[in-house]
Each structure stands twice: as C-alpha cells, then as structure tokens.
Amino acid sequence: MQHLDKLIKLHNLLKNRRTPISGPEIERLLACSKATRQRLVNELRYRLNAPLFCEPGVGYYYDRDDPRHPFELPGIWLSAEELQALVACQHLLGNLAPGLLRNEIGQLRSHLEKLLDRSPGIKTPQLGRIKILSQAYRSRNDDLFLTLVQALFAQQRLLIHYHARSDNQTSERPVSPQNLILYKDNWYLDAFCHHREEPRTFALDRIRSATASGEPAHLLDPATLQQHFGSSYGIFAGTPEHTAVLNFSAKAGRWVSDETWHSQQQCEWLTDGRYQLRIPFNRHEELLMDVLKYGAEVEVVAPEFLRELVRQEAEKLLAVYR
C-alpha cells in the first residue's frame, strides 16, 4: 500500500476532529498533492470501508451517525517513524534482558524490519550504533525471571529458596511480590516476606528456586512501598534513620552536581568551592562503597560512625600498599 504514513495521518486527522477539514488543508498538513489526497480518500472509502464523506464547499469528515463509526484502521498500523522507534526499543530490551525471550524478540525484530523495508525512503536503523555497556552484571536464570514476572502480574504469592551472601545460608521464604527492579545492571524483587512479616528486597541471582503457591499476594499500598523502598539510599532501603553529609572537592563536584543520588537529596555549593550532598539512608553498606570510590575527593562530615568506617577502610587500604 503506497503512502502508508500519509494514510495513517489522514485517518488520525479525521478521527480527532469534530468539524470537517478542507481538501487544501489536508494537502498542507500531509505535504501532498491534490492527486495524492484523492488517492488517500479513495483508499479509506473503498478499500477500508471508512465512513468518510465530503460536503462540497465544507470538507471531509467521518460521519458519527454511520453504523461503521467509530472507525479504526485494521490491525496495528504504525508510521515509519514509529516503526523505527519500536525497532530501537526492541533492541534496548534485548540488551537489558539478554537471553530472555530471545526467539520471540528476534521474530518481532524481523517482522518490524520487513515492514520498514516497505516504507519508501526509510532506512532500517543501524542498531549497532546504540550500545548499552553493562558493568558488574550478574548471571540470571531466565525461567526463574519469567516465574517471578507471572506471579507479580497475577498478584500471587511465591515460595522462594534464597541464598543470602551476608551469612552464606539458604532459607525458605513465602513472599508476596510487589515490584521488580533493575538497579545498576542487576534485577531485584521487592516483596513482603511472610516469614519476617515485613518488606524485604531479594537479589534475583540469589533466588535458587521460586514456585507460585496459588494464594493471593498481600499487596502493600503505594505509600507504604514508597516509604520503605524509596525513602532511603540504595537498593536495600528501609526507613531512613541517618543523613549522610558528604563534601566533594570542587573537581569531583562538577560531576556529582549533575547526578541524582537520591530523590530526597539536598545539595549546595559551599563558599570554599566544595560541593555538599546530604542523603537520607538506613543501611550504610552501599553508601560506604560509593563514597570510597571517590577516594580523597570526598569527605564524610556526618554521621560520625560512617566517617569512622571510611577511616578504617582507608587504613586497611594503606596497610595493603605499605
């Protein structure tokens, strides 16, 4: 079908209007000739059976009293630009979840590229120019991932076997999934743990198995979820009990000032040129690692226990290189 993009645009013009639109106005908006406009009108009327009428001297419109109204184009019709964007999104999805639904995503990409080939003057995107460079990516069981997704969407409880790195122990946990999170290139499950009777976050790469119990999930209200999982720094959040005060050097501050470490952070440039960042946190482990990677370019001002932890780690590091 020729002029597919213009046909879609003409349909959208007519569908969204309550007053007729003139032929010259259609030609202006679609950047087409009178002959092309007439071909598009005929395509809608006679091939696609649209309730399209023309009132002489007034313009074209969809007859809302016609039994064919409301009229939609059959199937999923996308413009060339929308197809290009969809191909790019498919490429990004394949990179964010490597291996997951590989065959299905590959078939979708092949179909989209064939549709693009039929659009004159439109090139298939060079997807090699879009890169996602993952760092410290941990392996993931794709079958397990799909089990978690299905339970999340079906709002069902899961029985998981979880191996914790902290104590090197495996435990059985009945949980109610709340959210799946992609954080720093790795996936996590926010859930209500019925064993602990509180919200917990589980790293997907440490879940050894998961089985849907068939019981309905216990869903937390959005405010409770935000308070527990979104109010503190890092993935293993909880209600914040401390505020970290970090002073970055002027050099490091030029980078940090453009970053969002936390949605409730407070920041300012100090009179001596340094950049101060205040962050609410509960558990210190992740924050400690992120502070240490800046080395001497950052000073922990408060709380005192976090400052002492940084000092201890610095002394251990110095001892290694003595």
Image (spheres, rainbow, N blue to C red):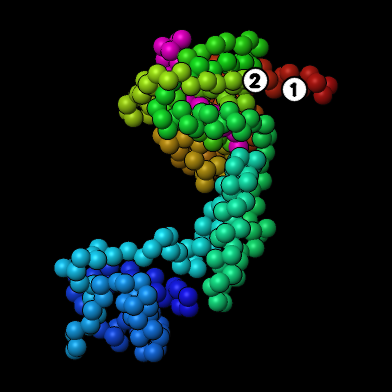
Residue 275 coordinates in the image, percent (x, y): 52, 39
Q: Are marks 2 and 1 in contact (CB under 8 Å)?
A: no
**Residue hosting label 1:** 317
User: Where is residue 68, by image quadrant?
Assistant: bottom left
Rendered residue at 42%/24% (across/down): 156
Residue 158 coordinates in the image, percent (x, y): 48, 20
**Viewer-closest of 258 and 48:** 48
Give the structural element (helix, strand or loop) at label 2: helix
Of the 4 image quadrants, the one containing the C terminus is top right
Q: Is residue 230 visible?
A: no
Residue 191, placed above or below residue 267:
above
Residue 50 coordinates in the image, percent (x, y): 30, 71
Rendered residue at 59%/42% (across/down): 101
Q: Is residue 319 visible?
A: yes
* Residue 73 in magenta stretch: no
Rendered residue at 68%/34% (across/down): 136
Residue 28, placed above or below residue 95:
below
Q: Amino acid at mark 1?
A: Leu
